[in-house]
Image: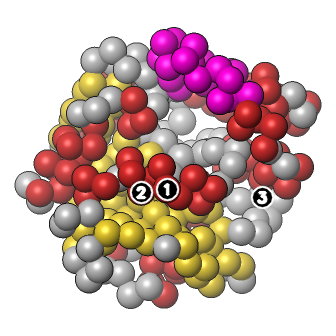
Amino acid sequence: MIESISCGGSEMKCLRFGKKGARALVVLPGLSLISVMTFADPVMNAYKIYTEDHEVFLFDRREEIPDTYSIGDMAKDTAEAIDRLGIKDADFIGVSQGGMIALAIALERPDLVKSLALCSSAVGMADHAQEILEQWKQLAVSGDIRKLYRCFGKDIYTESFCNENAQAFDMLADMVTQKDRQRFIILSDAASGFDMTDRAEKISCPVCVFAASEDSVFPVGLQTGFAERFGWKTQVFEGYGHAVYDECPQFHPMVEKFFNNN
């Protein structure tokens, strides 16, 4: 079920499914050109492993966003939406940019976060990741959305996955509206300069970093280095890229195991 939640003077979509009244699981997805709400059925299927023990709340970014919209702003708006649903002490899955938002919520609103699975994400933006985001943004600015999808796919998926889904990427590109494109540009700017390295040690909940050995956006060494610095757990998946959460069959079972142990 997709709900609209008031927050930040706008609305935020939330996909809600699973065992009603059970332990809450908040999912914060990464940067995308098209809202994840467009793909509610496959998303629910991908996260079905959690539904025996959790009620799942997957949040999009808010509907209307200002021209400048930071990770901190996203965290504040998402926390407001979570409050409106009465969620407390939830497990969190934060994917890529969603992981940055989750980190900010865990720091500012520890009452909301019981444990955090930080997936293909980082505590701070490295130069290489910033360059990749800038390339995506410039392709969006130019309006070459098919090229953007091909570049996006190359940067986050394995080569075999990209080859198998080349036509699907073109179909998705054709679905992108002008509003989607402008929204993507603003959201891609949000991660610029993101850096919580001086504050992340204050996060009090259990955190596990789920990383992939071939991640070209946030290299595995960067992710595991943050984990070691802050005393967080790690789980590395060999042979996968940034979008390991979409490709690896063992990914979600390992995340669920982390939640069950906390």
- 3D distance between C-alphas at marks 2 and 1: 5 Å
Position above or below: 23 against 171: below
User: Which sits in the foreground, 198 or 227?
Assistant: 227
Query: Residue 165: horizontal and vertical position, in percent?
Result: 58, 23
The crowd level at tag 1 (other Cα within 10 Å; few <14, some 14-19, many 20+) is few
Residue 90 position by quadrant: bottom left
Query: For residue 68, which numbered disc appears in the image?
Result: 3
The answer to whether residue 131 is magenta is no
Q: Is residue 104 visible?
A: no
Position above or below: 61 against 238: below
- 3D distance between C-alphas at marks 3 and 2: 31 Å
Q: Pointer 3 and pointer 1: residues touching (CB < 8 Å)?
A: no
Query: Where is the C terminus found, in terms of image quarters?
Result: bottom left
> Which residue is the site of mark 2?
44
Query: Residue 160: horizontal and vertical position, in percent?
Result: 48, 12
Residue at point 48%, 42% (across, down): 96
> Which residue is the site of mark 1?
41
Q: Pointer 2 and pointer 1: residues touching (CB < 8 Å)?
A: yes
Question: In this figure, what is the number of numbered marks?
Answer: 3
The answer to whether residue 161 is magenta is yes
Q: Is residue 11 left or right of residue 53?
A: right
Position above or below: 107 against 157: below
Give the residues drawn in magenta, as a range: 148-170
* Mark 1 residue type: Asp
- 3D distance between C-alphas at marks 3 and 1: 31 Å
Query: For residue 159, which numbered disc appears in the image?
Result: none
Q: Main secondary structure of the magenta part?
A: helix
